[in-house]
Amino acid sequence: MRFLGRLLGGLVVLAVILVAVAFVLPQTVNVERQVEIEAPPEAIFPYVNSMQATAEWSPWLSLDPEVELTYSGPEAGVGNTLSWSSENRRVGVGTQEITASVENERVETALDFGPMGTADAYFVLEPAGEATTVTWGFDSDLGMNPMARWMGLMMDGMVGGDYEAGLANLKAVVEG
């Protein structure tokens, strides 16, 4: 009985330490990747300024051929929205809406993953001689949720590879 009491006491102390440390961890997370595409910004912009065009190179939509996609709003630019639903955990459910668009320079989107949280994503197009450097990133505020803050430490590893694959797909589509 005494052993069980010590074990439970130790687990409570460990839980308190994990929660306390979580509040020292960053409240925000940023993941960002870049690729250089041999094309001017105006050739790339249509692929990042439309959810319909994004489907051509998305690293996630190819994971589930049965994913349900619904588009709303204008065909491109601010208000263009994609909602998706998939039984594949890596795809899941959510919405992405273009919230800001500066022609041939920048596109910003709001992501809502339902119970998984929200994030803001962006594409930045910077001329680099005859090519363009495309930066794809996202920011998320993890709030006061200790579990989310621990997950934030792993976010780059969880999403970074997908961003690299997506940018490689975008490069192939634009340069092809």
Image (spheres, rainbow, N blue to C red):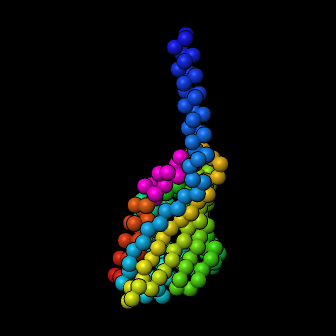
Q: Give the prevailing secondary structure in the magenta stretch.
A: helix
Q: Residue furthest top?
A: 1
Number of marks:
0
Image position, residue 2 (x, y; %) = 55, 11
Q: Is residue 42 visible?
A: yes
Vertically, is 29 above or below 169?
Answer: above
Q: Nearer the viewer, residue 116 or 67?
A: 116
Residue at (43% x, 55% y) in the render: 157
Identify the residue at horizontal 46%, vertical 57% (top origin).
Answer: 156
Q: Is residue 156 rendered magenta in the image?
A: yes
Counting from the top left corner in percent of width and height, residue 151 is at 52, 48
Quadrant containing the C terminus in the rendered view: bottom left
Q: Who's the residue at 47% across and 51% down the image?
A: 154
Q: Considering depth in this image, is 169 or 13 the residue closer to the camera?
A: 13
Q: Was residue 94 drawn as part of the magenta stretch in this picture?
A: no
Q: Is residue 175 above or below residue 65?
A: below
Q: Which span is picked out in magenta? A: 149-159
Q: Quadrant of residue 11?
A: top right
